Image (cartoon, rainbow, N blue to C red):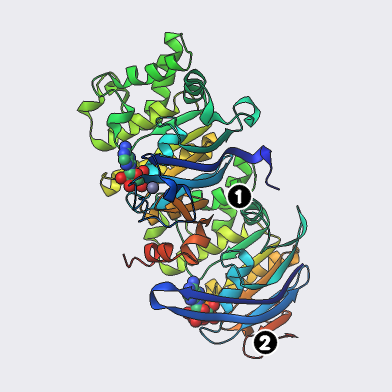
Amino acid sequence: MLSVQNISKSFTIHHLKQTRTAIGGVSLHVDKGGFLGIVGKSGSGKSTILKSIYGTYKPDAGAIMYDSQEHGTVNILDISDYDLIRLRRTEIGYVSQFLKVMPRTTSLELVTQSLLEMGEPQEIALDKAKDALRHYDIPESLWNNYPNTFSGGEKLRLNIARATVKAPRLLLLDEPTASLDYDSKLKVREAISKLKANGTTLIGIFHDLDFMEGLCDHVYDMNEKAQQVI
Amino acid sequence: MSTHDNIALSVRGAGKFYGDRCNYCRNENNPLNNNICPYCRTVFAVDDVSFDLYKGEILGIVGESGSGKSTLMKMLYFDQERSAGEYYITGYAEGVPNVFTLSSQHRREIQNEILGMVYQNPVYGLKMDFSSMSNIAEKLIAAGSRNVGEMTAAGDHFLDKVNIPLDRKFEPPENFSGGMQQRVQIAKALSNYPPILLLDEVTTGLDVSVQADVLELIKEIQRELGISMIVVSHDLAIIRMLCDRTMVMLNGSVAEAGITDQILEDPKHHYTQQLVYSIL
Ligand SMILES: Nc1ncnc2c1ncn2[C@@H]1O[C@H](COP(=O)(O)OP(=O)(O)OP(=O)(O)O)[C@@H](O)[C@H]1O
Ligand SMILES: Nc1ncnc2c1ncn2[C@@H]1O[C@H](COP(=O)(O)OP(=O)(O)O)[C@@H](O)[C@H]1O
Ligand SMILES: [Mg+2]
Ligand SMILES: [Mg+2]
Ligand SMILES: [Zn+2]
């Protein structure tokens, strides 16, 4: 499904006359329906890998081959902006470490929009969005409120709801459970388990990968630069 | 795949020069003093700009003051003659002719039927002493409408859409606040359902809550009407919120372009980094 081949990424900060290497020579792969965890210490380049797969960062070298439903096998580093935007709308989801909310967009609108973007009809999108908000215990009283007034945990759960509701083919998770309480974490685990059962391929960064035991089938260790079955 | 089918307009090598250019600055390899020729003082307000606008997308343009953003927008709306380059609009004559070179009559046709423009200063987009309704009617008449009932209905529809109380529709915009004037301008620009809308710094100078209203309106229009838009702003927060892709201009040229999160999270050009890291 996804094969990351020997990617490297460095950042040049002009005003500091500085070049930082974030990752060098990373290779990993995930089969369709698989779940790969990435572990490594802070600053080791985990998020850089996910952002490269999502197309936010452009690696300096290597290739990222993705088996797209719509386009066949493509190198994410080579496709046009247009195709990448489409892939993100319909096939590849991303949950970031931080929630980016739209001002003046209610939580219900936010989740509904992500479904409309992929072409779901209005009514179905609305129903699915409500189900997702219910699943993540976002109380109905908050559905018509703006998320910038939400607590950290509510924001994060909303973020996850927005990405998982689309049941993307490939879902990238950057520490989605980091600041959640135990019950919320369980909800995330349950949602991931459901997605996995429905065939979604997952790559995730988790501080406590143990929590994904039984779901996660491979792990990539930044330190060893190697992938193992677990 | 990106093909003709999903492109609303294409610009290739667009240039706007103020001055006669000399032998030195005709050679594009010779460096300029920012955007000015050190010998003949020709200003290269827009210099070799190329890009595509996809159907239904919002394309952002950012850049410091004087980088050529407004000049480019005015060229696209035919407010200003171009000095160089090509411009194709898919919705006009199958996208075949370079519309920069059309007669003024054909350009007016495009202005009336395909493009909408919202200026930074409402004075350019509105007749301040005509009623809001008449402003909209004027645009519709230019677009060929003759039926008063239809025009009134369209006026009501769009003024309501931009939240102008309908009991004030016969008041002239000069009686309105800046945010209301901007919303009337947007209603006017939308009234003939143009497939392409150009917006130049439309929220600059408005207070924050009014700004949010206008931005919300823009997003809603894009979602509901599927209009392709170019949004010029110097505010990266606005670009982040609205735009699928972003083009960064510097001294009349494109410094960098890409999907918005690529530009904001991994800026490569020196200038974009200054902008994003706010060290200007
Ligand atoms: N956009 C960027 N610009 C400059 N340097 C960056 C950028 N993104 C990452 N880096 C650098 O690349 C390295 C890897 O960062 P990355 O965010 O991938 O680490 P991480 O493993 O996710 O860390 P954490 O666990 O703290 O989130 C760091 O040195 C970081 O400073
Ligand atoms: N009518 C003009 N005559 C001469 N120079 C002009 C004229 N209009 C714009 N310029 C110059 O062109 C450059 C770009 O201006 P403009 O497009 O207004 O910038 P922005 O909108 O990005 O602030 C500036 O150097 C400006 O001084
Ligand atoms: Mg990280
Ligand atoms: Mg300007
Ligand atoms: Zn010269």
Residue at position x 61%, y 74% from top? A49
Q: Is mark 2 within 8 Å of ligand 1?
A: no
Q: Amino acid at mark 2?
A: Lys
Q: How many marks?
A: 2
Q: Is residue B75 above or below residue A187?
A: above
Alpha-carbon span between mark 2 and mark 1: 36 Å
Q: Residue furthest bottom?
A: A224
SS type, badge 1? helix
Q: Amino acid at mark 1?
A: Leu
Q: Is residue A81 above or below residue B202?
A: below
Q: Residues within 10 Å of mark 2 (few under 14, many from 20)?
A: few
Q: Nearer the viewer, residue A128 or B125?
A: B125
Subunit of label 1? A
Q: Nearer the viewer, residue A27 or B169?
A: A27
Q: Residues within 10 Å of mark 1 (few under 14, many from 20)?
A: many
Closer to the N terminus: mark 2 or mark 1?
1
Residue at position x 38%, y 73% from top? A15
Q: Position of residue B192 (x, y in %)?
A: 47, 23
The residue under label 1 is: A115
Residue at position x 64%, y 51% from top? A86
Q: Position of residue B234 (x, y in %)?
A: 36, 52
Which of the two marks, 2 or 1, is nearer to us in this view?
2
SS type, badge 2? loop
Q: Is residue A182 visible?
A: no
The mark found on residue A78 in the picture is none
Q: Residue furthest front?
A: B23
The residue under label 2 is: A225
Q: The C terminus of chain A is located in which quarter?
A: bottom right
Q: Is residue B178 visible?
A: yes
